[in-house]
Image (cartoon, helix red, strand yellow):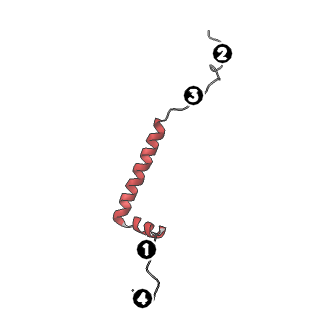
């Protein structure tokens, strides 16, 4: 320990470029694509199950012409 003169090695934080490089290699890119596809499908499925809010206080729509 006393003979070391250089700066101590500190753990490096993962860089965004390194993740991008890792995610674009062939086997990982297939997995990333499938995960994104499942994420988009699940979000659209969830959005489709939401019930729209009903408008309150508007009443029935106006009649265009009198019934015959």
Residue identifier under label 2: 65
Q: Which mark is residue 54?
A: 3
Q: Secondary structure at mark 3?
A: loop
Q: Quadrant of the N terminus?
A: bottom left
Residue identifier under label 1: 11
Q: Secondary structure at mark 4?
A: loop
Q: Position of residue 27 (x, y in %)?
A: 33, 64
Q: Nearer the viewer, mark 3 or mark 2?
A: 3
Residue identifier under label 4: 4
Q: Locate residue 55: give its quadrant.
A: top right
Q: Pick whichever of labels 3 and 4 is earlier in the sequence.
A: 4
Q: Secondary structure at mark 2?
A: loop
Task: Tell me the crowding category of disc 1: few under 14, some 14 to 19, or many 20 or more residues within 10 angstroms, Cα based.
Answer: few
Q: Pick whichever of labels 3 and 2 is earlier in the sequence.
A: 3
Q: Locate residue 34: give its quadrant.
A: bottom left
Q: Pick whichever of labels 1 and 2 is earlier in the sequence.
A: 1
Cα distance, mark 4 to mark 2?
A: 94 Å
Cα distance, mark 4 to mark 1?
A: 18 Å
Q: Quadrant of the C terminus?
A: top right
Residue at the limit of the structure toward the top, as seen here = 68
Q: Nearer the viewer, mark 4 or mark 2?
A: 4
Q: Nearer the viewer, mark 1 or mark 2?
A: 1
Q: Nearer the viewer, mark 3 or mark 4?
A: 4
Give the residue displayed 42% in from the left and 45% down from the top.
42
Q: Pick whichever of labels 4 and 2 is earlier in the sequence.
A: 4
Residue at the limit of the structure toward the front, as seen here = 2
Task: Tell me the crowding category of disc 4: few under 14, some 14 to 19, or many 20 or more residues within 10 angstroms, Cα based.
Answer: few
């Amino acid at each position: 320990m006393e003979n070391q003169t250089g700066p101590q090695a500190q753990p490096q934080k993962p860089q965004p470029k390194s993740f991008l490089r890792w995610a674009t290699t062939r086997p990982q890119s297939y997995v990333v694509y499938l995960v994104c596809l499942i994420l988009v499908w699940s979000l659209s499925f969830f959005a489709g199950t939401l019930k729209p809010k009903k408008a309150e206080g508007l009443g029935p729509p106006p009649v265009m012409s009198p019934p015959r």
